[in-house]
Amino acid sequence: MNWKIFLAACISFFAILLPYNIIGCGGSDADPYDYFVSFFDKKLDTEPHSKPFYYTNYKFLYDDEEPVNLAELTSAEWINYTNSKASKADAYNFVCKYPVKDITNLYNHIEKNQPLTIADSLKSNPLTEYFIASKDLEALGYLIYAKKLEPHVTGSWNSWEPIQRDSIVMGRLIKNGQQLYTAAKKSSIKLRYAYQVVRLAHYSRRYQDCLNFYETLVKPFKDQSVLQELCVSLQAGALQHLGKREEAAYEFSKLFNRDNYNRISNYMSFDWSVDRFDENNRKRCLQLCKTDKERAGMLALFALGSNQPELEALQKIYDFDPESRLLATLTIREIHKIEDYYFTPSLAFQVGDTTAVRGYEEISKNDPAYLRYRNEATAFVTLCERIAGEKKTTNGDLYLLVAAHTSMIARDFKRSGSILKSINVKKAKPELADQVQMTNILLTINAKDSIDGKFEEQLLPSVKWLIGKAKKDAEYEKFYRRLFVDVLASKYKAMKGADHVKYLLCLGVADKIVNESKNEWWGYSPSAVFLLRERSSASEITKLIKLVESSKLNVFEKFLVSTSAFTKNDLNDIAGTASLREYDFDGAEKWLSKVPDSYYEAEPFTTYLSANPFADLILDTHQPTEADTVQYTRLSFSKKMKKLKIEAETAANTTARAKIYYELAKGYYHMSYWGNSWLLGRYSWSGSEYEYGDKSRNQDYFNVDTAKAYYLKAYNTSADNNFKARALFMAAKCDQKLFGNLPGQNNDPSSLDYQRDLTAWLTKFDKRNNYFSTLGKTYRTTAFFKEAQRTCIYLDDFVKKMKK
């Protein structure tokens, strides 16, 4: 991905449409690293200030806060200048926080003996005491000048709004700065004026002047100051704006690799100066480097923002400079890319899926990125082993661990185990020893073709170790969750004779981790209860309940049951609801009778029925109506449907039987997608579900064939014409569901396309729906027919056509 284009696109899109951006552009406290399956601790990168450059493919930077506060760094230089006992906080407050009017007041007090009317905090600041004692008006005058120009040169790289600058005012400040530079006697103060003049020239877009000022005002000084490096970055920025992009990239590369401050700014500026995926651009920039160390630093910056395989760059960086400060960072980034592009989809492919989701994208086994990283893995392992073996770096065990972890991902289990054994865990740092244990757990699980009770019991101590780590470390809490949802659940699902029950239990463990966590999870939604509610059959849930209630569980099964997010009440309610969905009213009553009323009071949004499922409605609605005089629960509905089915068999006469059939039809209809009580057999409803949802599990939920059959039974059994008209109309309404929604419904109702589609749909409906014909010919004089014609536009339209 070209991040410069992506960032620009985000800015444009943001301005047009959204108050925030879901991925990449907007800030978030959630972890932008948690969208793919990863089990390698990013904190093993011990390079100071590397956090912004952790791997993530959904943000330009993992963290966009500068690791070193530049204002605190520059203000701290005043402690040495004043030879005072001021703390860094004192210096920061004096230089950065106190307003210019107070510093001016202090200046006038020293120069003109005017009253010192400033805050007590400023009076007691050691720097104030220094200036009053030394009468150093030259330095104090500089601070007044710097505070006046600060509003013209500040701004953030990630600001959405363009920064407005007054070039005329800035021009006057430049002239004033040049005069003060000339008048200044102390070299340290001269350097500060030089920095401000260069800074003003840069931000007022006088880029050639910026270069000239740097050469004439800054270069002559040898003072040790952060400001000199800041001036280099300003002149490098001027080079970039003047089209000398490769020269600018060279300067920014040196700054980035030399300094810990302004790292994000220098990195951003480097990125805007190069095309990181253009090999010729890389070569031209490398030609400017004078030493192998500089070449290693240049290549490292090219690789640092890349989401492409960078094995070749890593090899060259190591050869140029084995002690490169970015080598470990880039190595860990590379393994995270392998986890993102290869390991994550491979878990789906291993369970037999033909496609996998990577981020928000569905891919196949032929996906180019998947194949690239799969093919890179072995060579990457070889390089890491070489780095560790040659012992030119101080952290060789890290590279061995990366090699072992990558071998595990590549399913070279023998090689992975051999490498892990070569690491001296007793002498390793604690965080590295922990990662050895984590990788070993994954290796042990993945090397097994199937999981049996004996292996489960052997696995439990490792899981408990992981729980202990998870309580102290958010990274390991994520590993704990992912072990169950991405590895163990997949393993149970992939086994011969897939263990669906333990698959669901593993998901339940992962959900509980999330539910009880104090950390914010990015890109993960609990799924176990959802799958149970929406995708599981009554028999599958019954098997789960049987396991949960068993007294013969092994220790690992007991752990799964006790640590899962769903409770016995959840399972009984879900089993009862699934039975309802399958029209097993005996089973529904059995399971739902075990659930206390308090359970439903705690979850009204997923279990509360506001409508009467036996209401007699001509028009479909999900809103409460006047017919909702009685409220039902899932349990009471199940009992009534059972009772009605028994009564239908024992009814004393046809009139009574017809009415019972009609009541049953209403119950079945209102349980459907179209009915007012769909919540009887479902926990959610979507307007797009009919068109895009899964109809394979229960077609009757959409087609209402059972309801139609009972309406027709009521029609055929009754001798009452008004009742027969009502029953036949309701059967016609069921029949209409086979046509789905109106074609063209999303078009403009006044458009010709909409009118054409509507006419065609109604024509087909009229020809297909023979019940309307019978209604119009036989029952037109009934009271119900007249009511229905006034209410139903379809029937009214059909009758008008019959008259013609």
Image (spheres, rainbow, N blue to C red):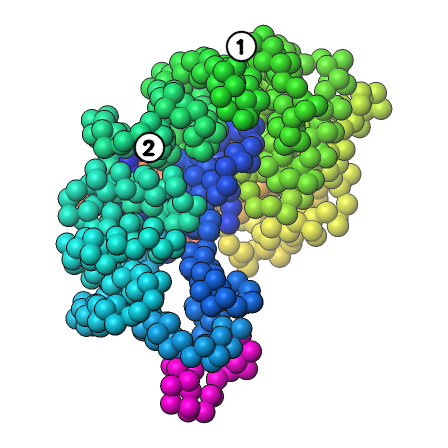
Q: Which quarter of the rendering shows the N terminus?
A: top left
Where is the C terminus found, in terms of image quarters? top left
Mark found first going from the N terminus, 2 or 1: 2
Residue located 61% across and 40% down the image: 474
**Where's residue 246, x and y in %?**
21, 37
Kindly identify which numbered label has been placed on residue 294: 2
- Provide the residue span drawn in magenta: 104-125
- Residue at position x 48%, y 79% in the image: 133
How many numbered circles are shown?
Answer: 2
Instruction: Name the spot of residue 109 as percent of width and height, x first.
Output: 42, 87
Looking at this view, is 451 or 176 the one in front?
176
| Farthest residue, direction top | 414
Regarding mark 2 in the picture, which secondary structure is present there? helix
Please report the residue visible at 16 percent of the width from the left and 57 percent of the height from the top.
209
Q: What residue is shown with label 1?
A: 412
Q: Residues within 10 Å of mark 1 (few under 14, many from 20)?
A: some
Residue 108 belongs to magenta span: yes
Q: Which mark is residue 770?
A: none
Q: Is residue 718 magenta?
A: no
